[in-house]
DNA sequence: TATAGTTGTCTAGATCAATAGACATTTTAG
DNA sequence: CTAAAATGTCTATTGATCTAGACAACTATA
């Protein structure tokens, strides 16, 4: 008999959402690969110890995300399952790592600005506070699904045309190259996980309560001089990060 | 005037929990460092556009976590704020990386078992399915706060005394050494973020809805032979991961 | 010692989340 | 064609969540 899976009550997170999260995880773990379908609503209701209507709310949310599709009389089919793997190494390049996993990579420049360096960013880039930086806000998607939003900072004196070149070329690596920098390496990466804020929910097309993986990274040229500080937020249920040491 | 921060309604995540998450994040970002206190309930209520009672529920949850402490007439003080940094490199060792950040590191063996290798684990360890493995379940804490739970697998023929040695020494590195392996390296690490399940909530003393960072890692000896597959779940609001490439 | 500012407590009502049961509709298997 | 199995829809009820307002209790300061 099926193992009873626990969900917690009175925690500020509705049962239907907890169940939706568990089913999403089970799908991405391949638990239902044998049939390509989610178990029947009645079976799930028993498994989680809740009413069938509660399970239906969870499945409705997953259907909204386009993850499953219910067909009356037949069952609920899985439409999509895998997480994209994003490799992080000394030579991390956004497009390269995803190349084989998604057919089409989209990069959209949301906006850019010139801001003075301060706090953590100034420290990470080894600049004195106040040094002008180019700020770039971008969204990256794979096969039409948004995967990450990024806010990047570049020293404005060294890369004055960053925004323009990125807008033209759609890639940080290419924008660097267009400004005379042909190679660079990842100096450091820090990763935290947290709930997405309202802006991230909108840009990544996530349902509220969703999780983002935030990577704060510094890239440096081959002389070790920092050239970019980036804060990249990945949609946690669409991505996993692979660390290559 | 304060910027209105948005919270989403009818999403399966109660407003008080969304607000608690936002305040927790603000605390860990140092937004309230100037005063060491959370803004007054009335100010927060206006900021989030909700009733004061809703903010009170959020603060009560944070007080339960021991993150803040309310004093009548005075305000709500911040008790604790920082995240511990966990370094991941080619020579990742649990205790070493945390050494300077926490005074006392605790390791507790929850249980152990002998299981046959299968699926992802067999593949990662380069073993044929069915090969016997030692499974170890552990909780690791820093200064009394649980930081991570881990499930590790070791080839049983090579490390037959893993459970025993870990129980005695409280460290995987030392247990390896006791069985004749003096050095090893991190071969691969994959990171995902998701909501904690009921067991993780209990072991990590988290409030429901909390996030875990799950790292699936493989360690290998210096000849490149895999010796350990581990699934480590970190309490996301207490840890950040630092990738050293 | 007032007084302003803050948290604590209580009551009441509106809306959302979850349970329960009944039955309709559709697909698949026999 | 029939029956079983699955999703779809409806009604009703209970408990959680959120709003609203009023006032008590405590702290710091002028």
Image (spheres, coloured by chain):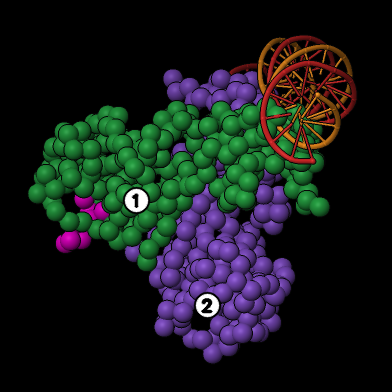
Chain colours: A green, B purple, C red, D orange
Q: Nearer the viewer, residue A165 or B130?
A: B130
Residue A100, label in figure: 1
| Residue in view at x 49 percent, y 47 percent | A82
Residue A19 lies in quadrant: top right
| Residue at x-position 31% and y-position 45% | A230
Q: How many marks?
A: 2
Q: Which residue is mark 2?
A: B227
Image coordinates for residue B233, horizontal then vertical, percent: 58, 57
Q: Distance from label 2 to label 1 (Cα)? A: 29 Å
Query: Residue A226 magenta-drawn?
Result: yes
The one of A78 and B11 positioned closer to us in this rendering: A78
Is any part of residue B97 visible from this angle? yes
Question: Please, what secondary structure does the residue beneath circle 2 have?
Answer: strand
Q: Chain of mark 1?
A: A
Quadrant where the C terminus of chain B sits is: bottom left
Point out residue B188 in the picture as x, y percentages from the top left corner: 44, 66
Q: Choose mark 2 or mark 1, whichever is in front.
A: 1
Q: Nearer the viewer, residue B35 or B191?
A: B191
**In this view, which residue lies farthest toward the left?**
A180
Establish if A224 lies above or below B115: above
At mark 1, the secondary structure is: loop
Query: Which quadrant would residue D25 be assigned to in this image?
Result: top right
- Magenta residues? A219-227
């Amino acid at each position: 008999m099926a193992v009873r899976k626990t969900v917690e009550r009175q925690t500020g997170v509705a049962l239907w959402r907890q169940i939706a999260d568990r089913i999403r995880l089970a799908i991405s773990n391949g638990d239902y690969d044998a049939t390509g379908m989610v178990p029947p609503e009645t079976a799930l209701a028993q498994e989680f110890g809740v009413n069938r209507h509660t399970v239906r709310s969870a499945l409705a949310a997953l259907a909204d995300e386009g993850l499953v599709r219910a067909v009356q009389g037949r069952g609920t089919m899985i439409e999509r399952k895998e997480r994209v793997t994003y490799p992080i190494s000394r030579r991390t390049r956004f497009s390269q790592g995803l190349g084989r996993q998604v057919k089409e990579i989209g990069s959209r420049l949301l906006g850019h600005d010139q801001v003075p360096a301060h706090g953590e960013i100034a420290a990470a880039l080894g600049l004195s506070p106040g040094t002008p930086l180019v700020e770039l806000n971008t969204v990256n998607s794979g096969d039409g699904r948004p995967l990450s939003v990024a806010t990047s900072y570049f020293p404005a004196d060294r890369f004055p045309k960053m925004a323009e070149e990125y807008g033209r070329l759609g890639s940080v690596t290419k924008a660097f190259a267009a400004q005379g920098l042909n190679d660079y390496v990842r100096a450091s990466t820090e990763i935290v996980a947290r709930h997405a804020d309202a802006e991230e929910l909108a840009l990544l097309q996530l349902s509220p309560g969703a999780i983002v993986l935030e990577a704060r990274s510094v890239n440096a040229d081959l002389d070790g001089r920092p050239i970019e500080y980036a804060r990249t937020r990945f949609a946690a249920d669409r991505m996993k990060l692979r660390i290559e040491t």
